[in-house]
Image: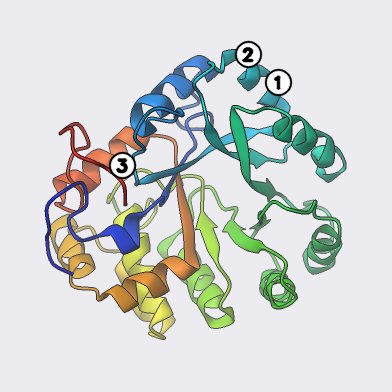
Amino acid sequence: MGRPGGYWSGMGALLARLIDDAALFPPESAPMDEALSAHRAATGASRHARRDPLVGRFLCPASRFAELRTHLVPEDLLDLGVIADTGLEELPKTLDAVRAEPRVRPSSVEIALPRDADQARAAAVTIARLPPGVPARIEVRRSPGWLHVLDRLAAARDSAARVAGTLADEAPSAAALAAFISACAERGLPFTCAGGLDQGVRGAAHQGPMTVLLATAHAAAGEPERHVRRTLGRTDAEGLAGDLLALTDVQARAARRLLVAFAASDVRGVRAELAAAGLIRTPDTGEDMSP
């Protein structure tokens, strides 16, 4: 893919809008005003500013949307990912409020299945009750029957529903994450990674975006789960970056058709990690950062 100039180092197909800003969530758990200020600085998220092509949605619990509105400024224009922490029943009301706020755009909703319910059946009920017009991400726990949940989500996509899976484990092992990625690849089911995955390349328990991207590329190419698991266990940042740069555009786009987004509570840290690996250039050069 080469190393052209500009913000990207030949990685646009892999990195465009990869990182969802989860600053409100652990481990950062930033106050709302600080989280929004940092998001603006990271993305230029206003009507008159350039956008950082790496960063996607700002994730906000439904229970805190009213609070978020009090911290918006007139220039804001946020792509908002709503986490449905108040339940599926309250979600339409929250989305009505989001749609009525011109300074945000509803880009996704993330919904957790009831813990005490049959997960596959709960997935079917949730899909049937999804609000129209906004892509949904449904959390998948690796509890008994989790593969049947993925089957339900894949079937919904075949019916034109805009759903993706989200691994709900806070700190999955390499084996657990490899199983999830491989299962999604087998079904052609897009997924997101969230929770405990933004710690950089520090071992199998905390896979960073480079390992997840490369592992997803391997899964998309049909490589066996053991190869995906081995990639997730890698800690050689330079080698990972080199392997990512070696992907063709076809391979990169296949990986991103699966990996929708990577939620990180420390966006600046992720950007610094990717810049140190030579995958992006720092965005403070005054260059046009359009992907």
Q: In the shown orientation, is residue 54 left or right of residue 20?
A: left
Name the residue located 49 percent from the left edge and 76 percent from the top edge. 182
Mark 2 neighbour density, 10 Å: few (under 14) some (14–19) many (20 or more):
few
| Nearer-the-camera pick, 61 or 100 | 100
Q: Position of residue 62 (x, y in %)?
A: 71, 32
Type of residue at label 1? Ala
Q: What is the distance, in whole Å, between disc 2 and disc 3 at their CAs? A: 28 Å
Dot 1 or dot 3, earlier in sequence: 1
Residue 59, given in percent of the width and then of the height, sits at 56, 37
Badge 2 vs badge 1, beta-carbon distance below 8 Å? yes
Q: Identify the residue position indicated by label 1 in the image.
A: 66
Q: Could you tell me which secondary element the residue under label 3 belongs to?
A: helix
Instruction: Give the class, few, some or many, for how many residues have Cα within 10 Å of label 1's Cα (few <14, many ≥20).
Output: few
In the image, residue 164 sits, relative to residue 42, either above or below, namely: below
At label 3, the amino acid type is Val
**Residue drawn 72% across the image and 41% down it:** 84
Q: Secondary structure at mark 1?
A: helix
Instruction: Answer with left or right where residue 213 lies relative to residue 111.
Output: left
Is residue 229 among what the camera can see?
no
Q: Which amino acid type is marked by label 2?
A: Thr
**x and y, in percent, of residue 17 in the image:** 41, 50
Q: In the rendered structure, which disc, 2 or 3, sits on the residue that comes first in sequence?
A: 2
Label 2 and label 1: CA atoms lie apart by: 7 Å
Q: Position of residue 150 (x, y in %)?
A: 66, 71
Residue at the spot of label 3: 270
Query: Quarter of the image containing the N terminus?
Result: bottom left
The mark closer to the camera, 1 or 3, is 1
Q: Circle 2 is placed at which residue position?
A: 70
Pointer 1 with pointer 3, Cβ within 8 A: no
- Secondary element type, mark 2: helix
Of badges 2 and 3, nearer the viewer stands 2
Q: Is residue 112 visible?
A: yes
